[in-house]
Image (cartoon, coloured by chain):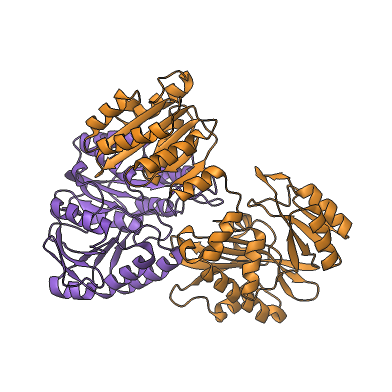
Chain colours: A orange, B purple
Amino acid sequence: MNLYEFQAKQIFAKHGIPIPKGELAQTPEEAEEIAARLGGRVVVKAQVLAGGRGKAGGIRLAETPAEARAAAEAILGMQIKGLTVRRVLVDQAADIAQELYLGIVLDRAGRRLVLMASAAGGVDIEEVAATTPEKIARVDIDPLLGLQPYQMRQVACDIELDRALLTQFTRIGLGLYEALMHSDATLAEINPLAVTAGGELLALDGKMVVDDNGLYRQPELARAREMLDESPAEREARQYGLSYVKLDGYIGCMVNGAGLAMATMDMTKLYGGAPANFLDIGGGARADRVAAALRIILADPNVRAVLINIFGGITRCDEVARGILEAFAQVPSKVPVVVRLIGTNEEEGRRLLAEANFITARTLSEAARLAVEAARAGTAAPAA
Amino acid sequence: MGILLDNRSRVVVQGITGREGSFHTLQMVEYGTQVVAGVTPGRGGEWLEGIPIFDTVAAAVEATGADTSAIFVPAPYAADAIMEAAAAGVQLIVCITEGIPALDMLKVVAFVRSRGARLIGPNCPGLITPGQAKVGIMPGHIHRPGPVGVVSRSGTLTYEVVYSLTQRGIGQSTAVGIGGDMIIGSSFVDILELFEQDPHTDMVVMIGEIGGNEEEIAAEYIAGRMSKPVVAFIAGLTAPEGKRMGHAGAIIAGRSGGAREKIARLKEAGVRVAEHPEQIADIVAGML
């Protein structure tokens, strides 16, 4: 789960990292009031979970409250990478002397956290890493010891930070580590970490990615999820414990297992189709879950065929077939459905489904081919 | 006879009295696995179908000589369960549980390594040496003994590939699911090294997916250090950037983790990369 800038910065502040004074606005009037309260120059920033906000015109400077209002008016409702801006953050503008980068990220292959810093901040750090990797200082964090102050001092020396900022910088690095650990985050990033004209460090932007597996013990963050721009389909999927991602294609996919679900999507592409979604229904195929999955898939108006691929394994396929039949009884539809079942009693499962007018397949490639054909024809026999 | 596991392995099941734990314990026993003990704190002294239950892994190991653990403990308690197994001297720890926080796993992996134990998973189907034993949740009947080692980040996709191998009469030495999480105990390279050394494995099938860069690291290892042929498949060519595809580890972040890059690196390393899972068996059949 990605956090918004304002959420990340609030967490940073709780861990002693200095952030600009600022408040969240949902209307131009609110933005104007906030700007008046803060006084002086402000920056109005689109709160949306996408990069490239600045280039898209989602970040504007305002000299007066009236200008802040106008800026908010322009930004609210704006589309950035397909996402609608519903909130802006109005921050006191800082006098920036230098922009640094400071981030902690999970190194999966190394099985540890890595802290990275650069004197070339404010830009895409992946770009810096790719073109001028020598400008990035990194330290590995021992999982059993955590980040130590000496490591921050080393990093400060490596990026040739002004000695006067050493103590502040160390404190901010340790605060960032604490913020990450306390939030079950796999990434916490300050970019830019500004050196102000007054010689202070200030986190002007913040990014955090929270591990979904940690949300059970992060009740505040789990509630914050409600603020995310989650579609109704995504919300329903989450409530049923289904893993769903909407895509742009027209073949609805329902599969047990994430890897197999991706392979099934890829297979539809290989046969000239395009997957409408990723959907992993998890173990077994209980009727209520299949029904929920089906409702979610069919709510997408682009879907012209449904491809169900279940590797039953230990689960009996005749039971899976009954689950599917029960689910379709609850969610009637005219969209053609191709089902492929593998596992114990698969012949019996296929027979039950064929009787009910489903298109059945024996292999994954056959299923993908049939689904693409059915979607193109648009006339295949409707499901029961 | 494959790697890591055979019919002499002595297995303790942690979380044996839970719904999943008890069901899969009986499945493992039916397949021929020696399940010698179970652990559920507070249920020591009870029995499950003739298998003694202990309060702690240490007690189970002392009484039964268990050397392998299968963990079915719910996510909030699973990291602790892995550490308990490592502390008790269990050599091979297989964690099936899905949903353990990544930050917990960092500590757990460091601890397991310090104890000289090996962890498979978490969030994995486990491993099976066909005809010998299985520790995990995979359907045993789709496997058959043979010369092909299988290593994969996924569950049902592995079954799919194994099934098509078996259907063509191609057996497996051992099939290992290393897990779909961001932080896992054993990497592709860890398992490839074992297959490379195993006299009963002639070639290896590797099933990867988007996210992370373990496939790229494996490609490097295969190019430099591996003599046995490897056939691969990478799932997720159609996955968009920034969206988690079910597995915690299956997410393309910025420039890393895309399927195209992984496929390119593997091909450069001399790996035959299948376009779809069913093609793997065709390629393997042509190479054996």
Identify the residue at image location x=55%, y=73%.
A178
Q: Residue lying at the far front in this picture: please name it.
A: A330
The image quarter containing residue B234 is top left
Inspect this view and state whether residue B50 appears. yes
Inspect this view and state whether residue B231 appears. no
On the image, the x and y values in percent for residue B76 come to 39, 66
Towards the viewer: B11 or A141: B11
Identify the residue at image location x=23%, y=72%.
B57
Towards the viewer: B182 or A65: A65
Q: Residue lying at the far left in this picture: please name it.
A: B50
Identify the residue at image location x=73%, y=52%.
A54
Towards the viewer: A340 or A328: A328
On the image, the x and y values in percent for residue A217 come to 47, 66
User: Left of B281 or right of it: where is A115?
Assistant: right
Identify the residue at image location x=39%, y=24%.
A370
Figure check: A94 above or below B212: below
- The quadrant of the image that shows the C terminus of chain B is top left
On the image, the x and y values in percent for residue A10 come to 65, 67
Towards the viewer: A140 or A238: A238
